[in-house]
């Protein structure tokens, strides 16, 4: 695959927006940022770019050949994508949190439609529906359903486990259909890693910019900073490792991998089923709270919609909007890739 591309300003803006969408998707339990990468046309370039972070690129850095490193790793592409994702995390994802809190049914309905559209997109462009590939599609569906039904674990702030959470949690960026944030819920560390620790990091950065370094003497603050550091290190390590594995399998078994992804995304639809109620963690008949005083989400209980309620039909409209967006992307894809 040829990584070096000449991109116009418009291409860069579109790529930034794709990173923005991927970052927002990664934050939402049940939604995979990898789906965004897959259907908007930069998934394989993302995997191959990560794959260039290897022994050769390390030698380039150690020898001071930074320009060669930048070119070899396709860093220009990665910088744009991750700038969008990072910006999203502190802007779009916050707005998304607001919408989930106030219009949860409609947000999940939109996501549900988007993922149905993703299945349509991948299925339409997948050409090998042989018995062998259909078998792997079924395996992918079974895996997606199984993961959505797993019970969550208890919160664990051990740094070695947090590092492992980083490796596993980042999977949503490299594996379409596998929601990294949902996996963190199953591991019991979603609130610890994506809410509490991030809030502490944001507060600390804000204090540093104002010249306030009192947090150094705060053991609780240092604890959370160590946690976010271990999680970030694990995520970076996971990105490189999984990309090398995916690059290997994509080269040799491209159709099989695509078949599994197609099945996995289909099976994971249960994760974003709009009609569901929250189940919170309990201890001695009381809700378990995070550091901000919010109840900690444990899992979801799904139910069938009430067709006598007006909101059900509004939700269906959002599902159709989500499907339409992906159909539009599929038809316009050649112009924006």
Image (cartoon, grey):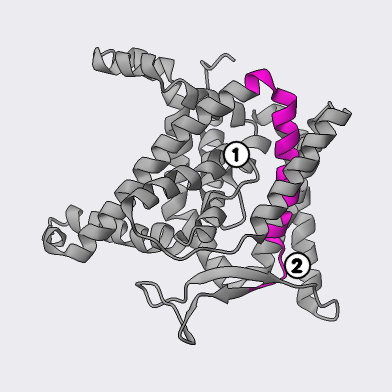
Determine if residue 180 is in view: yes
The residue positioned 57% from the left and 67% from the top of the image is 100
Where residue 315 is drawn, which disc sits there?
Answer: 2
Give the image quarter of residue 71: top left
**Residue 217 percent across, percent down from the top left:** 11, 62
Q: Is residue 123 left or right of residue 115?
A: right
21 with respect to 274 (left or right): left
Q: Name the residue located 71 percent from the left edge and 65 percent from the top edge.
A: 274
Q: Which residue is mark 1?
A: 175
Magenta stretch in the rendered image: 250-277
Horizontal and vertical percent position of residue 66: 30, 17
Is residue 252 on the magenta stretch? yes
In this rendering, position of residue 277 left or right of residue 212: right
Examine the rendered structure and indicate whether residue 143 appears above or below residue 38.
below
In this rendering, is residue 53 above or below 79?
A: above
Residue that appears at 16% across and 61% down: 215
Mark 2 or mark 1, which is nearer the start of the sequence? 1
Looking at the rendering, in which quadrant would you find the N terminus?
A: top right
- Residue 274: which numbered mark, if any? none
Q: Does 181 lie within the magenta span? A: no
Q: Residue 222: where, in percent of width, then height?
A: 21, 58
Q: Secondary structure at mark 1?
A: loop
With respect to residue 54, does 184 lie above or below?
A: below
Q: Is residue 327 at all visible to an observer of this figure?
A: no
């Amino acid at each position: 695959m040829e990584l070096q591309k000449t991109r116009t300003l418009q291409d860069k803006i579109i790529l930034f927006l794709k990173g923005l969408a991927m970052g927002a998707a990664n934050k939402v339990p049940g939604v995979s940022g990898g789906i965004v990468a897959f259907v908007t046309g930069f998934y394989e370039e993302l995997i191959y770019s990560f794959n260039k972070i290897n022994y050769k690129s390390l030698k380039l850095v150690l020898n001071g050949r930074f320009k060669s490193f930048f070119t070899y790793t396709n860093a220009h592409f990665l910088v744009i994508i991750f700038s969008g994702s990072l910006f999203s995390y502190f802007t779009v994802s916050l707005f998304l949190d607001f919408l989930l809190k106030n219009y949860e049914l409609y947000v999940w309905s939109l996501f549900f439609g988007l993922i149905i559209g993703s299945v349509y997109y991948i299925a339409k462009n997948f050409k090998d529906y042989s018995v062998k590939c259909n078998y792997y599609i079924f395996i992918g569906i079974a895996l997606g359903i199984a993961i959505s039904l797993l019970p969550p674990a208890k919160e664990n702030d051990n740094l070695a486990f947090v590092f492992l959470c980083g490796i596993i949690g980042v999977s949503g960026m490299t594996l379409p259909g596998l929601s990294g944030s949902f996996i963190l819920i199953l591991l019991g560390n979603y609130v610890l890693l994506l809410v509490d620790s991030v809030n502490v990091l944001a507060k600390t950065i804000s204090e540093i910019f104002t010249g306030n370094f009192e947090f150094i003497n705060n053991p609780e603050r240092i604890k959370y900073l160590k946690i976010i550091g271990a999680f970030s290190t694990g995520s970076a390590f996971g990105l490189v490792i999984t990309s090398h594995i995916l690059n290997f399998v994509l080269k040799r078994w491209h159709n099989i991998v695509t078949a599994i992804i197609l099945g996995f995304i289909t099976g994971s639809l249960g994760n974003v089923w709009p009609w569901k109620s929250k189940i919170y963690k309990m201890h001695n008949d009381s809700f378990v709270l995070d550091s901000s005083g919010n109840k900690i989400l444990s899992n979801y209980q799904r139910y069938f919609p009430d067709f006598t309620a007006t909101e059900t039909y509004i939700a269906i409209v959002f599902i159709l909007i989500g499907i339409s967006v992906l159909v539009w992307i599929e038809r316009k894809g050649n112009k924006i890739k």
